Image (cartoon, rainbow, N blue to C red):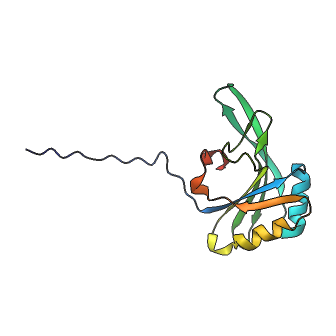
Amino acid sequence: RMRIMKKKFTLSNYVDYDFSLIGICSQEEDFKLCFFLNQALQLDFERIRDIEILLPKQGNMVSFSCFEYTDLDSDLSWYLIANRHPASNLLPDQKQTDYLLRIVGEQELIDTTQLVNQIKEIPCVLTAFVIPPQDVKNIENILL
């Protein structure tokens, strides 16, 4: 007699990867980088509430600055998020990245290669690169 085991699937770890993620390396302060991104890309970032995460080992909360711009014409939402804090990185496996640019919406509207090249042309940006979101551990830390 054969016994059939039922598989149970849960969506608790499901992440919708309908966004682009770009890493930016820059020694500039967050508000200055926003200014340069606004100029170069015709955006209008505004500061919103910080992202706070609990560091399990230390048991304390740390904050990461966050800026948002919503383009009503294309229905894209842009977020510039600081990745560095003296105690930890928001995305620990992205240690080389100072800032994360997350673009939410119809991905067909975004040419990430062209966007990365435009960001690289900003004088205070050392480099910029696409980060595949599905490869990032702790990606839930940046899902607002």
Q: Is residue 24 left or right of residue 17?
A: right
Residue 111: percent from the left, percent from the top?
70, 73
Camera-side residue of 118 and 14 = 118
Percent of width and height locating residue 11: 45, 49
Q: In which quarter of the image is the N terminus?
A: top left
Q: Image point 76% across, 50% down: which residue?
A: 97
Residue 42 in view of the camera: no
Residue found at x 78% / y 56%: 24
Q: Is residue 38 above or below residue 25?
A: below
- Asked which quadrant contains residue 2, the reply is top left
Q: Which of 99 and 75 is in front in this view?
A: 99
Outermost left residue: 1
Does residue 95 sit above or below 18 in this rendering? above
Q: In the rendering, at what x and y percent does residue 9 appear? A: 37, 48
- Quadrant of res 95: top right
Q: As rendered, which of 32 and 28 lies closer to the eye?
A: 28
Looking at this view, is 47 or 56 the one in front? 56
44 displayed left or right of 106:
right
Estimate the x, y position of residue 34 in percent, counting from the top left.
87, 57
What's the residue at 82%, 65% (across, down)? 119
Count how many numbered circles sit on residues in the image.
Answer: 0
Which residue is drawn at the image coordinates 59% and 46% (left, top)? 137
Q: Quadrant of residue 59?
A: top right
